[in-house]
Image (cartoon, rainbow, N blue to C red):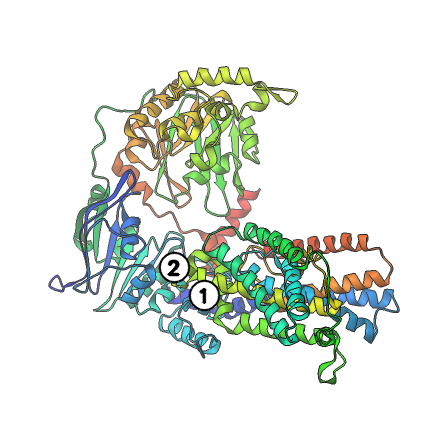
């Protein structure tokens, strides 16, 4: 067997291999998307009040907060990390918006920007702890989760802050900009998705996010400052947390300091259902948003069918198990 | 040719790690336009030398010059920018990124500071891949490629920095013959009048084909350099091993007529092992020799059920047994003492007593789920005495003992369990000379008590001194079996560096040679019936 013959033989395989590998990658997203369609169709048939314009808008509306948190979390999880602080962090940012707007009397826009930047600060601290102090992400963000929860209560004196004097604040969520029928919150989420997708697919930030999660050591040996990029990525996650804080307080017309816990797990669930691997390196924005939609559609549909809240959680838990197991089984089949 | 100045010149380089002098007054000359092979036994210092060259470590003393200039790399990236690229045995690739993304990681073409130019990236990668005639596509995911193709990605990545000196550490360890040939073609194309390759390998036949000169190192020191054309394999091997074995020490109690206790035949695993067969007799010390990665540890792990076995049978005292996990092996009274005793053999934070009693806890030291502390302590004390474990008491935390005494604790653990077969994986690794002697004495005592011992070791003198018989492995196969009388450093090394026959399944995977492929299917069919 000569070398040139070997090369030729291998070359013949190459296009086929390339096609199958991209197919494989699309499959998970396809699976998630197909599941979404199936669930959607099921509720459309099972309940007459599911498939109508108002309800679909309601589903999208209820996806906004989890969706935004999940977008930020996607970046962190693709690096192989985790962020448990997004739920209570979001609440802390909502309280910050309340303090800035209702107590300090700042204009609404300044309050919104302040709250989002404060989210970025939470992420920056997380990134610092994980990256420079070397604290495992689970621990670092667990600690931040508690800190944020406590601070939200301290700053607000444990009482809700109402935005009754700034009606324009609630318009951020429920208003209709540009005269379109979708509420602004849905537009915010859409813009968030587009920006995230661009960041992850078209920029070096996205490339290094995947690279770090795929093989951190090799990334560092390739001359990339892994520490710095991790800080950037956690900060980005924090900015999404801040934005989610604004959206949830605008929707409720108030900042509720005692809430927030549990949102981080829903966000992680959305990311995981969307096919992002908790061990890092793999994942997509489209998958995450499909995952978030699956959660909202399930919650909404089950509610319409008058299934009690308790059972909704049971079903969501099973969906997560099935989604992750299907993903693992698929990977095993490939190997 | 010899008049040409060296591209790389290494002189008087030493490097120590706590307790070990890895390199001592090392020297090396690489001429422009040549492939220089660097060979040496396990632990001879090859990897340390390469890590110095690629800027991972810093030398304690000595000088490096590269194209006549002093060469002091601060990081692998820096070394690459200066023109020296290294391809490690374990690849530094991102399996979830594409070929093109891997090749240009950290030096991506950009539209601005932040935005990528993906099309330009793929075009550049394609250009490079075509220039090197590599059978890979820029858009393929690296994780889906075969090892051979992943290596090509590594090479392309190295050459994307415009390397002048390419260092390859065991580049063919995971390749089959056809793939080796492709790699050699690639190397020959790369070598120009102003470039050179350092090629680290154990495989003598390959060196003959690819290397212009061969430099031998041993125990961290430079031994000599030979023109490939003017030397023989025999000479190179004797340069590699050329150390004297300590005087009178010979294996004790060698006898060929004992009953067979364990018989392994046709053992294969998906990852590495191919058709491994051997017998272990009662009261025998069976040595397993071979180079790093030959599959000796894998055999042990497969026998005790720690790794999944694809094919093959294990007979114990003539009866066929199937062992699914190490706990079952222990029930069959087979004990495996891992080469990494700190990770797999000991509870470092616990006391001597808890460690010695651990394996036999369930059958000997409990009643109704309660630990029989006094009985356990008594047994521990007994074994501490018998094995002469130096510890103030059985309540001492194991991590505070010396390496040799830690190893004895592991041995005591398996003796308490009353195993018939003990598999020692590198029993004297990281142990000082005096303690080694004690471990040897212990092994001999165990064998004369009728225990059967498999001893895996990378130290040739140790294998030769202790083994009644020696099984030599290379690349997942048994390449030779020697009696104590037949075994010499040279003969063991000869089998250890042998390249086993081409594996037909791999050839089939590549779509090569239909004759071989046909042969493999019939062979498989026979194995299954």
- Horizontally, residue B410 falls left or right of residue A267, namely left
> How many numbered badges does the structure rendering display?
2
Image point 21% across, 36% down: which residue? Answer: B243
Front residue of this view, candidates B281 and B217: B217
- Horizontally, residue B455 falls left or right of residue B239, namely right
Q: CA distance from mark 1 to mark 2?
A: 30 Å
Q: Which label number is shown at residue A10?
A: 1
Front residue of this view, candidates A23 and A207: A207
Query: Mark 2, chain letter?
Result: A
Of the 4 image quadrants, the one containing the C terminus of chain B is top right
Of the 4 image quadrants, the one containing the N terminus of chain B is bottom left
Residue A296's place in the image compared with B282, above or below, is: below
Q: Position of residue A52 (x, y in %)?
A: 84, 74
Residue bearing mark 2: A221
Image point 35% across, 26% down: which residue? Answer: B468
Q: Helix or strand or loop: what does disc 1 sit on?
A: helix
Query: Mark 1, chain letter?
Result: A
Could you tell me if the residues under marks 1 and 2 are in contact, i.e. CB atoms within 8 Å?
no
Residue with the most extreme left position: B3
Q: Badge 1: how crowded within 10 Å, few (<14), some, or many (20+)?
A: some
Q: Position of residue B255 (x, y in %)?
A: 36, 21
Image point 37% across, 19% down: which residue? Answer: B388
């Amino acid at each position: 067997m000569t070398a040139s013959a070997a090369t030729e033989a291998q070359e013949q395989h190459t296009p086929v291999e390339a096609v199958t590998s991209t197919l494989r990658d699309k499959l998970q997203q396809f699976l998630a998307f197909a599941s979404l369609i199936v669930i959607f169709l099921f509720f459309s048939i099972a309940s007459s009040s599911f498939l109508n314009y108002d309800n679909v808008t309601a589903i999208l509306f209820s996806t906004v907060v989890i969706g935004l948190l999940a977008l930020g979390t996607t970046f962190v999880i693709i690096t192989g990390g985790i962020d448990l602080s997004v739920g209570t962090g979001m609440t802390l940012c909502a309280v910050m918006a309340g303090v800035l707007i209702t107590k300090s009397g700042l204009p609404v826009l300044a309050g919104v920007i302040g709250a989002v930047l404060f989210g970025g600060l939470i992420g920056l601290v997380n990134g610092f702890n994980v990256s420079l102090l070397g604290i495992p992400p689970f621990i670092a963000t667990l600690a931040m989760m508690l800190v944020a929860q406590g601070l939200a209560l301290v700053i607000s004196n444990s009482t809700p802050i109402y935005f009754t004097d700034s009606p324009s604040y609630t318009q951020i969520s429920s208003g209709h900009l540009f005269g379109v029928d979708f509420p602004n919150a849905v537009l915010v989420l859409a813009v968030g998705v587009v920006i995230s997708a661009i960041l992850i697919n078209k920029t070096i930030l996205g490339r290094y996010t995947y690279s770090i999660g795929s093989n951190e050591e090799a990334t560092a040996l390739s001359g990339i400052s892994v520490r710095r990029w991790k800080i950037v990525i956690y900060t980005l996650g924090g900015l999404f947390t801040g934005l989610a804080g604004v959206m949830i307080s605008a929707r409720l017309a108030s900042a509720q300091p005692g809430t927030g816990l549990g949102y981080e797990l829903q966000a992680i669930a959305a990311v995981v259902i969307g096919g992002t691997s908790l061990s890092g390196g793999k994942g997509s924005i489209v998958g995450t948003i499909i995952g978030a939609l699956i959660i909202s559609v399930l919650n909404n549909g089950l509610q319409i069918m008058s299934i009690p809240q308790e059972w909704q959680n049971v079903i969501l838990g099973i969906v997560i198990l099935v989604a992750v197991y299907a993903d693992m089984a698929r990977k095993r089949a490939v190997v | 040719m010899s008049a040409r100045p060296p591209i790389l010149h290494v002189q008087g380089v030493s490097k120590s790690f706590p307790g070990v002098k890895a390199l001592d007054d090392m020297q090396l000359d690489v001429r422009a336009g040549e492939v220089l092979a660097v060979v040496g036994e396990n632990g001879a210092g090859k990897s340390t030398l390469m890590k110095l060259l690629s800027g991972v470590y810093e030398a304690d003393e000595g000088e490096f010059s590269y194209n006549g200039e002093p060469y002091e790399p601060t990081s692998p990236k820096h070394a690459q920018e200066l023109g020296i690229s290294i391809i490690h045995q374990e690849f530094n690739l991102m399996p979830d990124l594409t070929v093109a993304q891997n090749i240009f990681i950290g030096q991506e073409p950009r539209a601005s500071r932040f935005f990528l130019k993906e099309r330009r990236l793929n075009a550049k990668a394609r250009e490079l891949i075509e220039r090197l005639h590599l059978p890979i596509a820029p858009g393929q995911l690296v994780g889906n490629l075969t090892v051979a193709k992943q290596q090509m990605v590594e090479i392309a990545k190295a050459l994307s920095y415009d390397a002048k000196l390419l260092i390859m550490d065991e580049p063919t360890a995971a390749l089959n013959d056809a793939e080796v040939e492709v790699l050699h073609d690639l190397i020959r194309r790369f070598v120009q009048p102003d470039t050179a390759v350092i090629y680290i390998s154990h495989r003598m036949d390959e060196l003959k084909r690819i290397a212009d000169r061969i430099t031998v190192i041993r125990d961290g020191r430079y031994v000599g350099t030979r023109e490939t054309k003017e030397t023989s394999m025999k000479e190179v091997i004797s340069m590699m091993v050329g150390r004297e074995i300590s005087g009178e020490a010979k294996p004790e109690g060698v006898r060929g007529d004992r009953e067979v206790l364990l018989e392994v035949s046709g053992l294969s695993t998906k990852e590495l092992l191919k058709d491994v067969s051997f017998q272990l007799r009662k009261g025998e010390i069976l040595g397993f020799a071979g180079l790093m990665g030959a599959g000796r540890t894998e055999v042990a792990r497969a026998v005790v059920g720690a790794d999944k076995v694809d094919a093959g049978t294990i007979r114990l005292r003539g009866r066929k047994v199937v062992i699914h996990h190490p706990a079952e092996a222990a029930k069959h009274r087979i004990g495996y003492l891992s080469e990494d005793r700190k990770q797999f053999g000991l509870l470092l934070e616990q006391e001597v007593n808890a460690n010695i009693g651990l394996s036999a806890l369930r059958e000997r030291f409990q009643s109704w789920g309660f630990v029989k502390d006094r009985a356990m302590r008594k047994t521990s004390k007994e074994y501490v005495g018998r094995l002469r474990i130096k510890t103030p008491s059985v309540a001492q935390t194991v991590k505070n003992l010396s390496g040799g005494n830690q190893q004895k604790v592991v041995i005591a653990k398996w003796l308490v369990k009353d195993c018939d077969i003990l598999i020692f994986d590198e029993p004297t690794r990281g142990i000082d000379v005096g303690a080694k002697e004690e471990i040897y004495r212990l092994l001999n005592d165990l064998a004369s008590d009728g225990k059967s011992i498999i001893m895996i070791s990378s130290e040739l003198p140790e294998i030769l001194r202790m083994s009644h018989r020696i099984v030599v492995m290379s690349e997942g196969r048994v390449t030779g079996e020697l009696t104590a009388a037949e075994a010499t450093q040279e003969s063991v090394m000869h089998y250890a560096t042998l390249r086993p026959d081409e594996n037909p399944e791999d050839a089939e995977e590549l779509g090569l040679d239909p004759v071989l492929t046909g042969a493999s299917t019939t062979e498989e069919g026979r194995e299954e019936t």
